[in-house]
Image (cartoon, coloured by chain):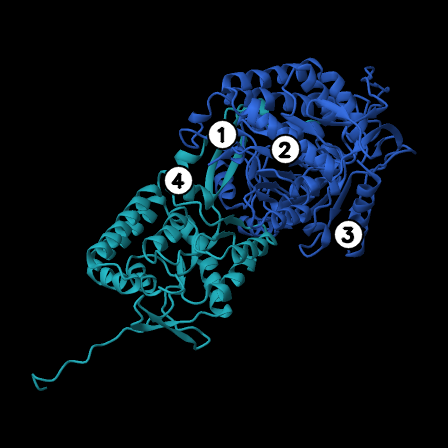
């Protein structure tokens, strides 16, 4: 090889992250992604309704085993994701700078904030249940306690203008609490999210726990909002208020828990949002065994 | 079985011939009236004003004024004292409320006396104590009320559902506009009188009787939050109606609870629990144990003892202290129960009812047990909301969980086994907001109640229940 020849750079194909794999859209479609100054960055997969449904199926399949893992293990896996992201901080800073037009220093700061956010949620996995739940002093001879449990499958529209940190807020609290998620990445700036799939795939996170789609919000989100196997819907990234109202109305059909845009990203509020309380009663004392009023 | 002599309740509450709407501390008349009927006799008990959209607007305006000028600025300690006072008045007038509830609803006096009214009083007493401690409730250091809350409640536990709604709302500093159910407005109106007696500032509590249209008007009005208990169909409509608005919403909807009896269960206790689970309050209970899942190896034994026990239940006069099963709340509900029971027969399930006489007047339905039920049958899928039990069997614990969770609902579930680890195993896997283990249908102000999936969202009771009425 001549030492004068310029080496041809190997460009990455940005694909979906679905069920632990990196498929193209089943539709075969893609769309061009540019930087704010118009430079073409790459093509991203343009997810279809079928991709959304496949993602929900993958999330559903992974949910019960994921929720069944110990909180300690879920915490270690989230921490592992932070480790992996730390190791690739430079790459993500570059991708983020390309995507948002931020300068290199600010972009690196955002990546570091995303790493720290993952560490933060890693520490929550084995604490939120004792913070949110507890024993209830009922007026009778009963042991009674309440614990927050995962809602199930959460579908999220990640913020458009905050393609990395906003994405972490869209999935980390949900999976910390034992949910599995389908996240629709920032429509205009999906590349950092799709790269984050590679971080998650090398963090011992079981396939299907986080599924990342790139595509048009207006096309894909309605299918997630109406999907009967989705339990929670995060509309944080839906800027169009009319679309947000339509999605909320669609979610009402199966009584999904909906997080409206503009509620912020307080950690405990998010953990609470993606859990449901379960209360268990048991007689305490021999006399309380009998069932009822008759 | 012993014959019991009649033991009718002797106290008769002072029921007025006519009640108005309770707006801004006063009873006022409306454009139209409707009648409330005693379902045990079909006699008209009283007439009551029916709220329309304009009345709702007036009530919401009164509640807004009370929120901004009186109740919002008031210290938690003072708010709490009003609620303690209400709790005490309810306890003092418990017997009167119990009889009134039995008359208007049809449920046995035994239940209103021992359950509905005392538990309602407990809800006020419990939440009264929260009013000055909200900063310690785990919802942030300075939790704020939401403002004016619109509340729509069902007919199955009229006073208790009112207490579940009003007590936490007021404790958290909100004011309320509440619509009681069309067929059971009496104890809500008596509660309005009790608010006057307690000198509760005008506008803090507004009571608007009416039917579905009045409920829809409350949902659509300028309230900050909607709280609803009732059917999943209406809950869905409410969730759609508030979509895209700033209104918060909590929904406590239908259920089709599984009551799972394992082969190592204490069978006699389980039978009591099964009976309580489905026949309590005529089965008009959203968390009723309407699907009995019994392990095959003990199914014959359980069913034999269950039928023996059900045959001893006394169906009849709700005001008789020995009555176990009272009147069905309305002709419409009786029709629905009858239709679903017919569907059960039509789909091939085996029906069993004890031989018992039913009164000639009023709305009645015999306790009913269906065996040979398949999961696909309507009686295994749809909420019947009546004294009708569907019995299914299972072989393995995994099958029991799979069958129990095979429903769009997720409100409650029951587990019967003497083995502790099996209880915890099952409780963790059951998709339900409340799990009763070796007991059923237990409720307490300190214990959060509510469902998941299509049984709604939000909790009522306990520290967790406060979240529904705070801006968190």
Lower sequence index among marks 3 and 2:
3
Q: Residue at x 84, y 33 (%)?
A: B33
C-alpha separation, residue under disc 1 versus residue under disc 3: 41 Å
C-alpha span from label 2 to label 4: 31 Å
Badge 4 is on which residue?
Answer: A268
Residue B346's image quarter? bottom right
Which chain comes out cyan in the rendered image? Answer: A
Q: Is residue B313 visible?
A: no
Please name the residue that numbered disc 1 is placed on.
B463
In this rendering, the answer to whether A38 lies above or below A73 is below
- Image marks 4 and 3: residues in contact by CB distance under 8 Å: no
Q: Which residue is mark 3?
A: B344
Local crowd size for mark 4, using a 10 Å CA cut-off: few (<14), some (14–19), many (≥20):
some
Looking at this view, name the residue that lies furthest to the bottom.
A2
Check disc 3 and report its element: helix, strand or loop: helix
Residue contact at pointers 1 and 3, CB within 8 angstroms: no
**In the image, which disc is placed on residue B416?**
none
Q: Colour of chain B?
A: blue
Q: For the residues tagged 1 and 4, is the chain the same?
A: no
């Amino acid at each position: 090889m001549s030492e004068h020849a310029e080496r041809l750079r190997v460009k990455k194909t940005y694909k979906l992250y679905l069920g632990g794999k990196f498929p193209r859209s089943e539709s075969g479609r893609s769309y061009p992604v540019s930087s704010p100054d118009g430079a073409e960055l790459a093509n991203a997969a343009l997810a279809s309704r079928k991709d959304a449904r496949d993602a929900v199926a993958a999330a559903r399949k992974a949910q019960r085993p994921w929720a069944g893992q110990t909180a300690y293990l879920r915490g270690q896996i989230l921490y592992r994701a932070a480790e992996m992201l730390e190791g690739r901080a430079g790459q993500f800073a570059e991708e983020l700078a390309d995507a948002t037009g931020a300068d290199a220093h600010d972009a690196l700061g955002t990546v570091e904030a995303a790493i720290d956010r993952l560490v933060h949620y890693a520490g929550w996995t084995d604490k939120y249940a004792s913070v949110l739940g507890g024993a209830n002093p009922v007026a009778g001879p009963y042991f009674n306690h309440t614990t927050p449990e995962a809602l199930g499958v959460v579908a999220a529209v990640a913020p458009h203008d905050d393609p990395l940190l906003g994405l972490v807020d869209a999935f980390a609290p949900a999976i910390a609490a034992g949910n599995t998620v389908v996240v629709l990445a920032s429509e205009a700036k999906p590349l950092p999210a799709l790269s984050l799939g590679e971080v998650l795939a090398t963090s011992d996170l079981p396939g299907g726990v986080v599924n990342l789609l790139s595509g048009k919000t207006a096309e894909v989100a309605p299918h997630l909002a109406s999907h009967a196997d989705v339990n929670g819907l995060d509309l944080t990234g839906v800027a169009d208020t009319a679309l947000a109202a339509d999605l909320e109305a669609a979610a009402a059909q199966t009584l999904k828990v909906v997080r409206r845009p503009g509620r912020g990203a307080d950690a405990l509020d998010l953990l609470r949002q993606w859990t449901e309380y379960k209360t268990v009663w048991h007689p305490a004392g021999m006399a309380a065994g009998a069932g009822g009023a008759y | 079985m012993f014959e019991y002599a009649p033991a009718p309740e002797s106290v008769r509450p002072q029921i007025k011939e006519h009640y108005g709407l309770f707006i801004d501390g006063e009873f006022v008349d409306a454009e139209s009236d409707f009648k409330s009927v005693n379902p045990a006799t079909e006699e008209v008990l009283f007439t009551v004003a029916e709220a329309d959209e304009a009345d709702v607007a007036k009530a919401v305006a009164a509640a807004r004024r009370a929120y901004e000028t009186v109740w919002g600025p008031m210290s938690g300690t003072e708010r709490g004292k009003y609620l303690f006072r209400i709790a005490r008045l309810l306890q003092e007038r418990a017997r009167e409320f119990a009889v009134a509830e039995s008359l208007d609803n049809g449920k046995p006096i035994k239940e209103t006396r021992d359950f509905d009214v005392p538990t309602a009083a407990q809800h006020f007493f419990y939440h009264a104590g929260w009013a000055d401690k909200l900063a310690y409730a785990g919802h942030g250091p300075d939790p704020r009320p939401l403002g004016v809350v619109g509340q729509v409640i069902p007919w199955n536990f009229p006073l208790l559902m009112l207490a579940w709604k009003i007590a936490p709302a007021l404790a958290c500093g909100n004011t309320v506009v509440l619509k009681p159910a069309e067929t059971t407005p009496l104890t809500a109106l008596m509660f309005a009188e009790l608010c006057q007696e307690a000198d509760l500032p005008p506008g803090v509590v507004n009571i608007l009787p009416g039917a579905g249209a009045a409920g829809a008007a409350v949902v659509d009005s300028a309230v900050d939050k909607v709280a609803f208990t009732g059917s999943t169909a209406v809950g869905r409509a409410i969730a759609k109606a508030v979509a895209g608005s700033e209104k918060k919403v909590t929904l406590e909807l239908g259920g089709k609870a599984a009551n799972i009896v394992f082969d190592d269960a204490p069978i006699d206790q389980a039978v009591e629990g099964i009976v309580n689970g489905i026949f309590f309050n005529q089965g008009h209970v959203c968390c009723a144990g309407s699907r009995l899942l019994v392990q095959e190896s003990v199914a014959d034994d359980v069913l034999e003892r269950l039928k023996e026990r059900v045959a001893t239940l006394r169906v009849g006069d709700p005001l008789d202290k020995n009555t176990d099963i009272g009147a069905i709340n309305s002709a419409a509900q009786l029709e629905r129960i009858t239709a679903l029971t017919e569907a059960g027969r039509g789909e091939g399930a085996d029906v069993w009812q004890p031989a018992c006489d039913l009164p000639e007047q009023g709305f009645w339905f015999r306790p009913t047990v269906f065996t040979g039920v398949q999961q696909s049958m309507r009686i295994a899928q749809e909420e019947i909301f009546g004294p009708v039990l569907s019995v299914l069997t299972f072989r393995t614990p995994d099958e029991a969980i799979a069958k129990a969770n095979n429903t769009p609902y997720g409100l409650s579930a029951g587990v019967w086994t003497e083995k502790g680890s099996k209880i915890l195993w099952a409780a963790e896997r059951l998709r339900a907001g409340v799990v009763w283990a070796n007991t059923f249908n237990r409720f307490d102000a300190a214990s959060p109640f509510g469902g998941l999936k299509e049984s709604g969202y939000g909790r009522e009771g306990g520290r967790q229940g406060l979240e529904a009425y705070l801006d968190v």
